[in-house]
Amino acid sequence: MLQLKNFRKAYMGHVVLQIDNFTIIPGMYWVRGSNGSGKSTLLKALAGMTAFEGDIILNERVNSKKQAVAYRSVVNFAEAEPIFPDFLTGTELIALFKAAKNAPAHQEDFYLESMKMTAYVNEPVSTYSSGMLKKLSLVLAFLGRPTCILLDEPLTTLDAESLPVLYSWITGLRQQQETIVLMSSHQTFEEGLLPTVQDIFVDHTTIRYTT
Ligand SMILES: Nc1ncnc2c1ncn2[C@@H]1O[C@H](COP(=O)(O)OP(=O)(O)OP(=O)(O)O)[C@@H](O)[C@H]1O
């Protein structure tokens, strides 16, 4: 469970999000909203990647500010347009994230094989296309034993063949009943490919569930 309390995010005095009290229970969610409404800002704040006022609390005890290391060890984030140090290979980045996230040995094998990445994962990321980078960022977001996975625009730049693979990874998380998956997207939800996904709508500086 994720709780936002007295949450406020402003850029240079301009308030983007003001959320007094909002609880997200385990499950899968699309984060919807128009351009500039604050979807990425919300995900970055939940990921502990941007400063904000107020509190974000995981499972009633881990505060993203007060227990930042514990919080970030179980909250994984894939950015909309991932940028990695050019000189590192995919394999090196995976090793780095596995160490940070205390991931089981060989956990990445399943993800790399299913996303057909084994042919290039040993190459420096400077040689990757935007879709290849996106796939790497998605693999990194599934490493460890995350309680919460935040995917900002996970569908952009992915080819048609990779979409069902990503959906199967997400569906597989259902077995871990406590997991929260939040995905922002402009694309229409593909009925039937994913288990029940709710919408969270970002609008007029706040968020709400849509029915
Ligand atoms: N680093 C920043 N500095 C100043 N303003 C910012 C910054 N990042 C975002 N903003 C502003 O905050 C608002 C929300 O931006 P955000 O990127 O969260 O929206 P979004 O809903 O993800 O948009 P999109 O659908 O276009 O990706 C916008 O008005 C944007 O201009």
Image (cartoon, rainbow, N blue to C red):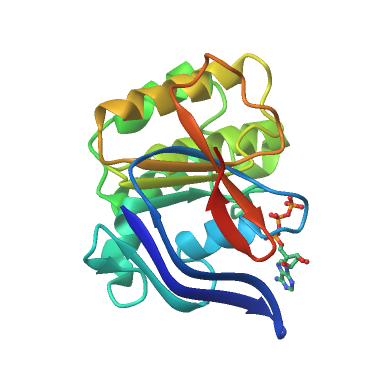
Q: For this rendering, which residue is in front, 131 or 173?
A: 173
User: Considering only vertical position in the picture, is 59 above or below 103?
Assistant: below
Q: Residue at x 25, y 49 (%)?
A: 102
User: Considering only vertical position in the picture, is 149 above or below 61?
Assistant: above
Q: Can you give x and y, in whole percent of width and height, for residue 79 in the image?
A: 59, 50
Image quadrant assignment for residue 123: top right
- Residue 49 can be seen in this image: yes
Left or right, 205 with respect to 36, comes to left
Q: For this rendering, which residue is in front, 55 or 67?
A: 55
- Residue at the front extreme? 211
Q: Can you give x and y, in whole percent of width and height, for residue 126 in the image?
A: 67, 44
Q: Residue at x 52, y 31 (%)?
A: 121
Q: Can you give x and y, in whole percent of width and height, for residue 81 in the image?
A: 67, 48
User: Considering only vertical position in the picture, is 200 above or below 186?
Assistant: below
Left or right, 4 with respect to 36, comes to left
Q: Can you give x and y, in whole percent of width and height, for residue 192 in the image?
A: 52, 14
